[in-house]
Image (cartoon, rainbow, N blue to C red):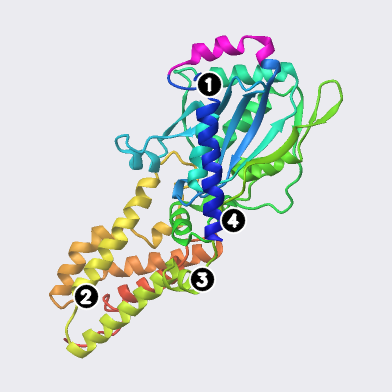
Amino acid sequence: MFIRAYILRSRTALLFVLAALLFPARAVGQGDDGELLVRHFADSDVVERTEISLITCEPFDRVYSLYGHTGLRLRETNGNVDLLANWGIFDMSRRFFILRFTLGLTDYRMDIEDWGWFCYRYVRYGCGIYQQTLNLTYAEKRRLIDLVLENYKPENRYYRYNYFYDNCTTRVRDIIEASVSGEIVYPRRGKRQSWRELIHDWNDTHLWARWGNDYLLGLPADRKTTDKEAQFLPFNLSRDFDGAVVNTAGGETKRLVGRGEWVVPQMYDKGESTFISRFVTSPTGAAMAYLVVFVVVFAAEVRLKKRLWLFDALVLAAVGIMGLLLFVLIFSQHPAVSLNAQILVYNPLALVFLYPAVRSLRRGGHSRCLSALAAMAGIGIVFGLLFQRFSEGTTALALFLIMTYMRRTGVVRDEKR
């Protein structure tokens, strides 16, 4: 399977390189060339012979690309111009990128690039590309191209990115909807799923990426989405486009998509979960490893008749640091992260209690403040079971943390040391 995919990827990449070298498209998609594009598409004949397609790319194994990608292709049938409008450009080298992304202050950029090099890049990633050519009239093409060029103006290229509500996929959908003369009617999706369940469909073999998503996402992510809200995922939008029809103002009905085809063959294989990846190196495995360490430390304390307070200090520091991030997310502009009951388990108060608790334990006493952490972790377990779906292993970890805290509070009998 691996050899076959490698050969397919190599052949496809070679074809795109040769096409780019032998039949290069005009370089109207490079640099600051908005005026050149406006002049080019001002010609009505150019608009008439331009095909516009929804482009959906398979995922690849990066956290930011586990869910695929969407773009808009503008191709002249005479081969003169072939471009990809892309609303998914971001720069991780910008100062404080991670902090800004966490707080919902990330600005993505729209760009227009050469189609051949776009395809070459995704072939190198090992991703297929599905194209759906839209069934548009001349007037609809004119409006759509004008909207794309308006977005491409330097003052309009940047937008405040939101993963669920305003991303590279929803931007393409909204421009298409604004261009069509009439109402687009999408097929019903059947069973409604929450935001969290929808992304779980795509990261089920990337358990630590799933854990990270679930750790950051709060209670709003468990709300059931509408059919249209579910289109924030590229292949959900692509499937809906396949069955969509347009009810025109004149009372006629037409299919939104004229034809669909894989212009780059399907190559992505997300793999399968194995016993090792599912139960040993997974978040659940990490929670069970903590339980083993806890039991070993407890047994060592009984045998040595000595308090290993450094273990408690490390636990409080780790829990507090993770909780501190969830506390910061309270102030985030992302609508699905500010209300997160996991903060009762990964509790930032652990950092506040760290010094007095460790000081008391080093002196051979107990720390009553740990009772508060244990109580809040217990409430967190209730929330995780009834209201919010916690990240994998978190409910079990909360139980283990309660055991860790309670043995130091004086509520649980502690032998004389």
Mark 4 nearby-residue class (10 Å; few <14, some 14–19, many ≥20): few
Kind of residue sitting beneath label 3? Thr
What residue sits right under mark 2 in the picture? 366
Observer-nearest residue: 65 or 321?
Answer: 65
Quadrant of the frame with the N terminus: bottom right
Q: In this view, does 93 lie to the left or right of 114?
A: left
Which stretch appears magenta? 32-46
Secondary structure at numbered mark 4: loop
Which of disc 2 and disc 4 is earlier in sequence?
Answer: 4
Kindly report the distance in space between the C-alpha atoms of the residues bearing marks 2 and 1: 62 Å
Which of disc 1 and disc 3 is earlier in sequence?
Answer: 1
Kind of residue sitting beneath label 1? Asn
Kindly report the distance in space between the C-alpha atoms of the residues bearing marks 3 and 2: 43 Å
**Do the CB atoms of the residues marked 4 and 1 lie less than 8 Å apart?**
no
What residue sits right under mark 3 in the picture? 274
Q: Does the magenta stretch include residue 107?
A: no
Which of disc 1 and disc 4 is earlier in sequence?
Answer: 1
**Do the CB atoms of the residues marked 2 and 1 lie less than 8 Å apart?**
no
What residue sits right under mark 1 in the picture? 151
Residue 342 locus on image (x, y percent):
43, 59
Kind of residue sitting beneath label 4? Asp
In which image quadrant can residue 366 be found? bottom left
**Residue at horizontal 47%, vertical 16%?**
33
Q: Is residue 39 magenta?
A: yes
Kindly report the distance in space between the C-alpha atoms of the residues bearing marks 3 and 1: 45 Å
Closer to viewer: mark 3 or mark 1:
3
Closer to viewer: mark 2 or mark 1:
1
